[in-house]
Amino acid sequence: MQTVFHHVARAVIQDSGRILLARASVGHVMMPGGHVELGEGAETALRRELHEELGLTSVEVGRFLGVVELTKEIGGVLHHEVGHYFEVRADELSDGFLASSN
């Protein structure tokens, strides 16, 4: 079985005790963020990914929360992911941004 490695940076963005999640095209949800490019730091990658995914231009990357490692099979390919998780404040998101989510 083919194995693919992913190094990612993810944001934990909270509002009123809720956490923002992103829906992936393959049907699962995850914390917003994405791949760390070769030679790029995790915090820099997170800022770039939040801009690309959510259009955020000003985010405050807070404390480092930890590393999550997981393995999942998608379409016969084994994906091994190592993710760095950070608290993030994004004032550009309106207050109560999760209030209308399903």
Image (tube, grey):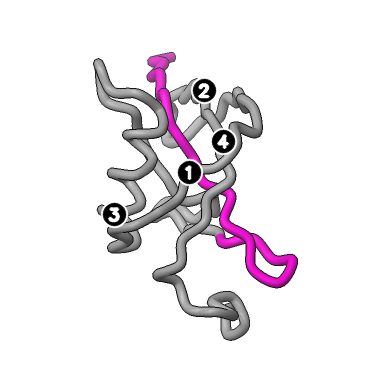
Q: Which residue is mark 3?
A: 51
Relative to residue 83, is residue 4 drawn left or right? left
Residue 50 higher or lower than 91, as above or below: above
Structural distance between the alpha carbons of marks 2 and 4: 10 Å
Specify the quadrant that holds the N terminus: top left
Asked whether the viewer can see residue 102, the reply is no
N-term mark: 1 or 4: 1
- For badge 1, the amino acid type reads Val
Identity of the residue drawn at 38% across and 40% down:
46
Distance from the alpha carbon under mark 2 to that under mark 1: 19 Å
How far is the residue under mark 3 from the one under mark 4?
17 Å
Place residue 58 in its image quadrant: bottom left
Q: Which residues are magenta?
A: 1-20
| Gap between marks 1 and 4 measured at Cα | 10 Å
- 71 left or right of 37? right
Query: Marks 2 and 3: which is nearer the front?
Result: 3
What percent of the width, then of the height, locates residue 97? 54, 77
